[in-house]
Structure formats: structure tokens, C-alpha cells
Amino acid sequence: MIEQGRKRRMVTALVAGLSVAAVAGIAIAGTAMAHSRQSSGAAGGPGTPSPVGVSTPAPSPSQTPSPSQTPSPSSSASTPSSVAKPQPAKTTRPAATPTKPVGTHRAPTPTGLPADPVAGCKTWLKEVSAQPGSSAKVVARLNGAPGIVLILADSNYWAGCDTAYARNGGTGSIRQPEKIANPAPGDAEAFTVANNLIKMLNGRQYEYYWAAGQLPAGVAKISYTFPDGQTTAASIQGKYWVMQHLSAVPWKPGMGQGPQIQVILWATNGQPLRNFLLNWGEDTCAQINHGC
């Protein structure tokens, strides 16, 4: 009886121990399952609900991505598709001027001088006088660097013409037409000049003088001495003479007129027949189609 009672107490103690162990095992298993669900909910896996009553902890400062990990604003993934990107301003350019094929037209003379000086002189003469007529021919001509001086004459009238002034983009110069006659050596008006300021190819302006006329009887040479100190002899061609002179120094604003122009008429024996000075303005603007 005593032995049986001892066995019963041992069985009861064993059953109690097994029950405690079973309860502890269940508790441990439940805790493990709870931790597993909490971890799955924090990971945010698709279709996995967060446990009721369990809040997701806020990320600690160490979990904040560093600037190097932050996508740059220029990344296409971070740029909202609804925000329009600024476009560069369009620059309006003038339309290009079409160029004509080479050889389709004759290029204008860069200096402005007429390609045909005789035709140019006849045109300018016709604009201011009916004489000499359309039958006028060239009776004297002087080709110079500034331009061409020539005389047109018919059977009754003659007129002097100079093309140098056309360098300024306008017309040439016309001397007052006169009847054909033999002037006297003492006629100072027959030797007046025209004075113009013209631009040469170097871009500078120069004082320029020209004259033309009929040759007086007994005169073999006509010379002009200008303010720059240089003396120029007229070109005598038959019964006519022509002259042109370009100042040696460029013109500058404020320059004075300088000494008067001296004219000397020379005889065939080399002796001076007449020596006189031209008055500025009165004797230095012998042209009728434009001023000086």
C-alpha cells in the first residue's frame, strides 16, 4: 500500500512537469510566431497585413539616406512628367541675301567712276546744257589717277568735263560751255579752275583741281602752282588744253585754303607772257552742275 501510494505521487509529479513543459513550449511558439508576423509587417511585403495594435517604429536618424544616396533633380525618375521643362529661347536671324551667279551682270566700278567716261560726260552735259550738241566729239583728253578730264566739241561749242567727282558717289563735273573762239592771253577767266574734295582708294580725301579751255595764240605752255607747293603743267592738245592736280597731302578738317593758285602762261621762246593769281571761290569753282 505504501509502495502504491509512492508510485501515484511520482506519476502525479511527472504529469504536472509535463504539463508545465507543454505550456512553456506553447508560450515560446506563440512568441516566435508574433515576432515573425511583426517582422513581415514591417518589411511591407505585398498582401501581408500588419498585426493589430502594433505600430511601425519611425526610422532612426541613421536610416535617413545620405545626400549621395538622394537622386539628383536631373534624374528622369525624379522629374514629374506633368512639369514642363524650360525651352531655350529661339534666336531670330535675318534671312540671307541670295547672291547672283557669277557672270550674270557687270559689277559696278568700286571707285564710282563711269565705265565709259565719254558717255558719262555726254549724259551729264545734256542734263545742264543743250550745247554742244549730240554730234560733239572728244577733242582733248587727259587720263589721270583721280579721273579723266576731256573736252567735247561740235562745230560751234565746246565744254569741259571731269569724271573725278563721281568718286563721291554722284556725277562728274561740267565746265560752262563756250563758243569756239581764240581767247586772249590776258583773259584770266579762261584759266579758272574747279576745286573739289574727292575720296581716293585709300579712303582718304584730297583737294582736287581741274581745268580745260582753248589755247590762246602765242601760248606754248600753261602752268599752275598750287597751295601744296607743286607745279602742274596743262596738257596741250591742238587748239585745246586740259589740266588736273591732286594735292600731295590728304585733307583734314580745319585745314586752311593756303596760298592762292598761281597761273603762268609761257611763250614759245620759254618766256612768261602772263602771271596772275586766282581768287578763292571766285576763280576756283568753274563748274555748273554742282558746287565746290
Image (spheres, helix red, strand yellow):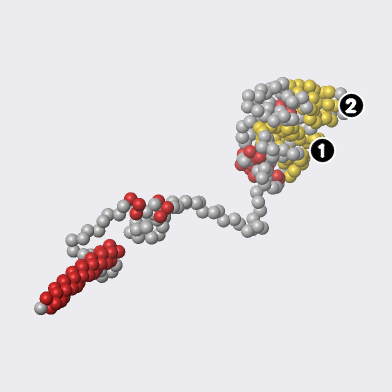
Q: What residue would you read off at disc 1? A: 238
- Residue 229 vs 165, above or below: the answer is above
Rendered image: mark on residue 269: 2
User: Measured along the vertical axis of the image, is residue 206 above or below residue 115?
Assistant: above
Residue projecting furthest to the left: 1
Q: Residue at x 34, y 56 (%)?
A: 83
Comparing 251 with 167, the one in front is: 251
Horizontally, is 77 left or right of 130 in the view? left
For label 1, the crowd category at 10 Å Cα-Cα, with few meaning under 14, some 14 to 19 and many 20 or more, is few
Residue type (three-letter) at the residue carrying disc 2: Asn
Image side of residue 65 versus residue 56, left or right? right
Q: In the depicted view, which residue is nearer to us: 31 or 278? A: 31
Residue at left offset 66%, top offset 22%: 256
Residues at marks 2 and 1 touching, judged by CB atoms closer than 8 Å: no
Name the secondary structure under disc 1: loop
Amino acid tagged 1: Gly
Q: Which of the 4 image quadrants contains residue 269? A: top right
266 shown above or below 144 = above
Figure quadrant of residue 244: top right
Residue at the spot 40% in from the left edge and 51% down from the top edge: 67
Q: Residue at x 63, y 27 (%)?
A: 253
Which of the pair 130/123 is nearer the observer?
123
Residue found at the far right of this picture? 269
Q: Sequence-wise, which precedes: disc 2 or disc 1?
A: 1
The image quadrant where one finds the N terminus is bottom left
Secondary structure under tag 2 reads: loop
Q: Residue furthest front?
A: 2
- Note whether residue 131 is visible: no
Q: Quadrant of residue 161?
A: top right
Q: Position of residue 187 (x, y in %)?
A: 74, 25
Q: In x, y percent, where is residue 157?
A: 71, 38
Q: Give the number of the disc on residue 65.
A: none
